Image (spheres, grey):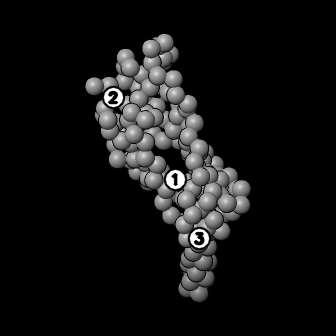
């Protein structure tokens, strides 16, 4: 019976250590990003895309860092000569906010300002997103789900 209790105690200690390590893993010097949700994955004419992104950063110094998003078109056909020609990379300074090891970033893009590229067909895109904290530590890059930009 004592041996059985020691085995159970050892398993509980191991599971507790694993749970503690897993929860602690999100808080590293290098920021970690994960997509929390979308307002929609189909953006109508004059609509807006909103992507909520959770961040985890041990030092909590993401404020006054940088935000990067690169648009990648997945359409097999190239853009025609009459289609818009816009840059594919967004780079913005993050605002100053309280030092917090976790929080949320909201990426909002308007249909007419950045999302609509083709004038002849719906467009399917993904965004590759990364951040750099105030100390210069860069996160890994995350990729959104496929997003369809609808023509009228």
Q: Residues within 10 Å of mark 3 (few under 14, many from 20)?
A: some
Answer yes or no: do the residues labelled 2 and 1 have beta carbons within 8 Å?
no
Q: Measured from the top left, where is residue 44 in percent x and y? A: 30, 34
- Whether residue 109 is visible, yes or no, is yes
What residue did someone put label 3 on? 99
- Point out the frontmost of discs 2 and 1: 2
Which callout, 1 or 3, points at the residue further toward the start of the chain?
1
Query: What is the quadrant of residue 129 in the picture?
Result: top right
Mark 2 and mark 3: span between their CA atoms?
39 Å
Q: Residue at x 58, y 81 (%)?
A: 9
Q: Judge left or right: residue 14 versus residue 51.
A: right
The C terminus, quarter of image: top left
Q: Which residue: 55% across, 59% down?
A: 95
Q: Secondary structure at mark 3?
A: loop
| SS category of the residue bearing label 2 | loop
Percent x, y of residue 72: 53, 31
The single residue placed furthest to the bottom in the displayed view is 2
Q: Return the residue at label 1.
A: 34
**Do the residues under discs 1 and 3 have CB atoms within 8 angstroms?**
no
Q: Residue furthest left?
A: 152
Q: Could you tell me how far apart the alpha carbons at marks 2 and 1 are, in whole angstroms?
A: 26 Å
- Label 2: how many Cα within 10 Å (few below 14, some 14–19, many 20+): some
**Residue identifier under label 2:** 150
Q: Where is 65 relative to 22, above or below?
A: above
| Res 133 → quadrant | bottom right
Residue drawn at 45 percent across, 18 percent down: 83
Q: Residue furthest top?
A: 81
């Amino acid at each position: 019976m004592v041996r059985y209790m020691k085995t159970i105690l050892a398993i509980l200690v191991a599971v507790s250590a694993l749970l503690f390590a897993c929860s602690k893993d999100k808080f590293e010097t290098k920021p970690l990003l994960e997509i929390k949700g979308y307002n929609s994955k189909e953006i109508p004419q004059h609509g807006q895309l909103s992507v909520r992104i959770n961040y985890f950063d041990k030092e909590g110094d993401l404020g006054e860092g940088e935000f990067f998003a690169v648009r990648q078109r997945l359409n097999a056909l190239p853009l025609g000569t009459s289609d818009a020609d816009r840059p594919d990379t967004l780079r913005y300074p993050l605002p100053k906010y309280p030092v917090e090891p976790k929080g949320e970033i909201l990426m909002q893009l308007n249909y007419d300002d950045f999302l609509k590229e083709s004038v002849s067909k719906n467009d399917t895109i993904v965004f590759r997103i990364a951040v750099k904290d105030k100390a210069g530590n860069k996160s890994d890059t995350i990729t959104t789900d496929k997003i369809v930009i609808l023509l009228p």
